[in-house]
Structure formats: C-alpha cells, structure tokens
Image (cartoon, rainbow, N blue to C red):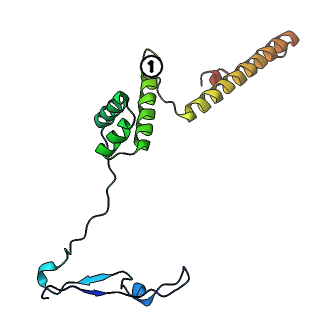
Amino acid sequence: MAQEIRETTVVDTERSGGERSEATRSGGSSTVERIPSSPQQVADPEVVAGPKRRRFTAEYKLRILREADRCKGAGDIGALLRREGLYSSHLVLWRRQREEAAQTQLRSRSRGPKPKAQDPRVKQLEREVARLQRRLQRSETIIAIQKKAGELLGIPLKNLDSDEND
C-alpha cells in the first residue's frame, strides 16, 4: 500500500442556510480532499486564467447561418449547434443582425455631398442676425419718415455725415 491515498472529510452538521463551518471560513474545504502519499501524484499548481468571451468573425457567422438555412431535417440545426459549440440564441441574434444589415443596404441613399454637421450656435447666431436686420430696417424707415416730416414742417436737421460713414 505504498501508493495509498488518505481521504479526509469535514463533516457537515445540520445548519441554517447562512451559517458556515469554521473550515470553510479559514480556507479549508467542506469537500473530500485527497492527499497524495507519493510525490508522483502531486496536483498541477498552475492557475488557470479566467474564461474569455468568444468573438465570432462576420465570415464565420455567415457560414453558420448558411449551414443552418440548409438544414431541413429534424435535429439538423441542433447537431450543427452542438458540433460548433453554439447556442440557439446565437442564431437568433445573428439572423437579426443579418436582416438589419440587409435593410440598411436597401435604403435609398441621398445623392450628392453629405450635409456637414452644423454647430447649434450657428443657427442661434443666424436668428439673431435676422432679428437685428429687421430692427435696423424698421429704424431706418422711422428715420426716413422723420426727415420727410422735418422737410414738410421746415425744421432744419443737422447733417450727420460722420455717423453714416461708420
């Protein structure tokens, strides 16, 4: 019995769901531990990296969708999914993405140069310029009427040529 493996267990007594044993809080395990009696059976101490999210290329997605579209028999799609290690939700999402891409390709595109994005402040300034031009036009009309009234009444007005050149 040179290669005998000793088994040690921590007995779980009846507890409520929130309680823990001292062994689990102190880093011990409440499961069966195998302690090797010879150095030949030492477990691999390497830490395995966490799982990585799979990324699928567009070509792969299209290939799988084409294969799924060709499946006619009962269970063919399930066999395809098992073979590729995929879920049915992948097919649903990829089909939706394929339809959206087809819709964007079919939409009519406007011809000519694309409109440039305008700063919202430009529109505000344009409105202010238009308002000030209307106000200026109104005041010039009032001044013209005052000049004509002054001429009719014989009131001499000073000539302000210096202001007009500004």
Report the front residue among 105 and 60.
60
* Residue 65 pos. (x, y %): 35, 32
**Quadrant (top left, top right, bottom left, bottom right) of the N terminus:** bottom left
The C terminus: image quadrant: top right
Using the image as rendered, state which of residue 5 and residue 100 is in the foreground: 5
Residue 163 figure quarter? top right
* Spot occupied by residue 38 in the image (x, y as percentages of width and height): 13, 85
SS at mark 1?
helix
Q: In the figure, 85 relative to 133: above or below?
A: below
143 in relation to 28, above or below: above
Residue type, mark 1 in image = Leu
Farthest residue toward the top? 152
Left or right relative to 118: residue 139: right
Residue sitting at 67 percent across and 26 percent down? 132
Q: Which residue is mark 1?
A: 106
Q: Please provide percent x and percent y for residue 147.
A: 79, 15
Q: Position of residue 18 (x, y in %)?
A: 54, 80
Q: Is residue 158 among the parts visible in the rendering?
A: no
Quarter of the rendering containing residue 52: bottom left
Near-viewer residue (101 or 41): 41
Query: Residue at position x 32%, y 39% from top?
Result: 80
Q: Is residue 37 above or below residue 114?
A: below
